[in-house]
Amino acid sequence: MTTQKNRSPAKTESIESIMESIETLLKKLENSETPLDQSLHTFEEGIHLIRKAQKALSEAEQKVQVLIEKDGDPQNTSVAFDEESQ
């Protein structure tokens, strides 16, 4: 008997959704009463999600790079972040 998750393989998850899933898995791993075999499975799921998030971030970075290029040459653009804003 196999169990299937209600996720469509064709639909991509948002990075926020992936991060929420990772946080949920971390909470499971932090529970000291979780059996070892279940912890290993949870860890494996976490690694899969982290790789998925890395791929999504890499793709987003590539899209940003394309958007800031003009006539094939990267533009010297900088983004200033106000560190003191709260």
Image (spheres, helix red, strand yellow):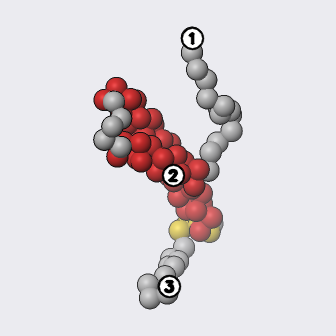
Look at 36% across and 35% down and name the residue there: 34
Q: Position of residue 72 (x, y in %)?
A: 58, 63
* Label 3 SS: loop
Q: Is residue 53 visible?
A: no
Image-based side of 4 in relation to 52, left or right: right
Which residue is disc 1 drawn over?
Answer: 1
Q: Is residue 4 above or below residue 63?
A: above
Q: Mark 1: which amino acid?
A: Met
Image-based side of 38 in relation to 76, left or right: left
- The N terminus - image quarter: top right
Q: CA distance from mark 3 to mark 1?
A: 52 Å
Q: In the displayed image of the protein, which residue is found farthest to the front?
A: 33
Q: Nearer the viewer, mark 3 or mark 1?
A: 1
Q: Mark 3: which amino acid?
A: Gln
Front-most of 34 and 25?
34
Which residue is disc 3 drawn over?
Answer: 86
Q: Earlier in the sequence, mark 2 or mark 1?
A: 1
Q: Quadrant of residue 6?
A: top right
Look at 33% across and 37% down and name the residue there: 33
Front-most of 77 and 61?
61
In the picture, the disc for residue 19 is 2
Q: Position of residue 86 (x, y in %)?
A: 50, 85
* Label 2 SS: helix
Q: Quadrant of residue 40?
A: top left
